[in-house]
Amino acid sequence: MERKSISFVLPAYNEEDNIEKAVTSVIEVAKDLPIENYEVIVVNDGSSDRTAEIIDRLKQENPHVRPIHHETNMGYAVALRTGFTGAVCDLVFYTDSDLQFDVREVKNMLPAIEDYDIVTGFRIYRYDHLSRLILAWGYNLVARTIFRLRVRDIDCAFKLFRREVFDVIEIRSKKFFVDTEVLAKARYHGFRMTEIGVRHFPRAGGQSTVRPSHVLSTLRELAKIWLEIYLGVGRK
């Protein structure tokens, strides 16, 4: 294997029911991977429950754990941007802290990252409410068409990147458009992408922060990023 270290990024907002198991699962998996080093970056996005307390304790128990705290809730995309830009390892992997994926499946992505810059998971079967499944289907269709992405499950929260991707791509979105933004900009800059099927499970505890009301704001961000990528509007 060419790359020898992985930064695992876990965004967390009010995940006191899940965060300890999520972090310890990553640690156990990392020990068995063919890598020399790893870090677990947990971005506490202004949680009002015991999330911060738990990850600070986990840091004391294991030096591989790196808590990063946002004083206030800044949004999903900002939490990921904090984790990605703070990562120091060769590879950057991210998944959510709600235990809806089996982090052991990251090992299936390692052979592919030798030939690609991004390996993105797609949910073989998705355990979400019907309304969310319908919204996700429609959104994926629109995003694939507008950005010409050959990815079947754009917003799957199970992705592995070469670190240099984030030396080129700057995340500008604030909330749940972040996966589309990263993949759209990656395609624009010529990064190589592939997909691998992953299992998806019902949420073990806590509540999802995604709401149907987020659709309009996500579409606004979609239009804004399209203008930035293809017309240079707002680009720094």
Image (cartoon, rainbow, N blue to C red):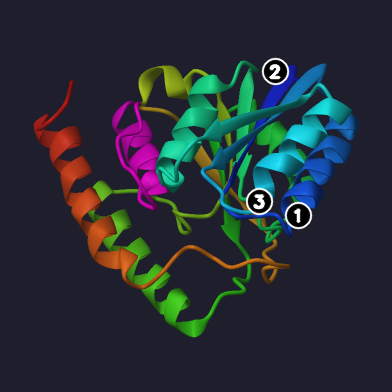
Residue pictured at 17% horizontal, 44% vertical: 224
Q: Which residue corresponds to the image point at 49% horizontal and 18% vertical from the top-left?
A: 164
**18 left or right of 211?**
right
Q: CA distance from mark 3 to mark 2?
A: 25 Å
Task: Decide: is 142 above or below 181.
Answer: below
For the point 40% across and 69% down, the residue is: 211
**Three-letter code for the amino acid on which mark 3 is drawn:** Ser
- Residue identified by numbered label 2: 3
For marks 3 and 2, the one nearer the N-term is 2
Residue placed most toward the observer, 7 or 142: 7
152 in magenta: no
- Secondary structure of residue under mark 2: loop
Q: Residues within 10 Å of mark 1 (few under 14, many from 20)?
A: some
Which residues lie in the magenta part?
170-189
Residue that carries the numbered disc 3 in the rendered image: 97
How many numbered discs, if any?
3
SS at mark 1 in the image: loop
Q: Give the Cα distance between marks 1 and 3.
A: 11 Å
Between tags 2 and 1, which lies in front?
1
Vertical comparison of 9 with 236: above or below: below
Point out the frontmost of discs 3 and 2.
Answer: 3
Q: Quadrant of the N terminus?
A: top right
The residue that label 1 is drawn on is 102
- Circle nearer the N terminus (1, 3): 3
User: In the rendering, at what x and y percent does residue 65 appear?
Assistant: 75, 28
The amino acid pointed to by label 2 is: Arg
